[in-house]
């Protein structure tokens, strides 16, 4: 795992930078502040809602990446936050900001859908 840790850290840092760039670009508005008819206003409102939803999802991903990088620095990366067992290397390669093993993640998701 140690040899892959540097590669995972690099991948996380790269994605973190991409998200920082995306989140910064969200400051732009969809409308041009000109007088709009009802259709333009509805479209502008819908686009702002979509942008907000997309931004929220990106912000959550960003927070998970920051936490994963903190865990690497603390030497606890790759350990499940729920059961404290190692997260499979395959899972970490697919989802490097995972903080739960597959079993605990599935249990969490099942609890959310109940």
Image (cartoon, helix red, strand yellow):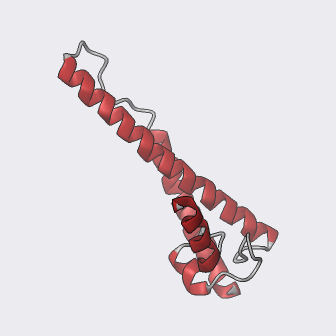
Q: Residue at x 56, y 80 (%)?
A: 91
Q: Tell me if residue 83 comes above or below residue 34 in the rendering.
A: below
Q: Tell me if residue 31 comes above or below residue 95 in the rendering.
A: above
Question: Which residue extends farthest front?
Answer: 114
Q: Residue at x 62, y 85 (%)?
A: 88
Q: Relative to the observer, which residue lies in front, 35 or 42?
A: 42
Image position, residue 21 (x, y; %): 48, 48
Question: Which residue extends farthest top?
Answer: 35
Image position, residue 108 (x, y; %): 61, 66
Quarter of the image for the N terminus: give it. bottom right
Q: Residue at x 66, y 79 (%)?
A: 5
Quarter of the image for the C terminus: give it. bottom right
Instruction: Tell how many labels.
Output: 0
Question: Which residue extends farthest right?
Answer: 74
Q: Relative to the observer, which residue lies in front, 70 or 10?
A: 70
Q: Image check: 39 left or right of 86?
A: left
Q: Relative to the observer, which residue lies in front, 27 or 36?
A: 36
Q: Residue at x 60, y 67 (%)?
A: 97
Q: Tell me if residue 51 comes above or below residue 65 in the rendering.
A: above
**Residue 29, image quadrant:** top left
């Amino acid at each position: 795992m140690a040899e892959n840790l540097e590669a995972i850290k690099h991948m996380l840092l790269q994605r973190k930078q991409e998200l920082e760039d995306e989140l910064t670009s969200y400051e732009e508005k969809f409308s041009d502040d000109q007088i709009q008819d009802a259709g333009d206003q509805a479209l502008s409102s819908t686009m702002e809602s979509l942008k907000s939803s997309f931004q929220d999802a990106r912000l959550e991903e960003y927070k998970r990446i920051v936490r994963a990088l903190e865990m690497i620095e603390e030497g606890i990366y790759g350990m499940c936050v729920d059961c404290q067992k190692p997260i499979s290397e395959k899972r970490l390669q697919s989802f490097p900001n995972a903080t739960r093993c597959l079993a605990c993640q599935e249990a969490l998701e099942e609890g959310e859908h109940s």
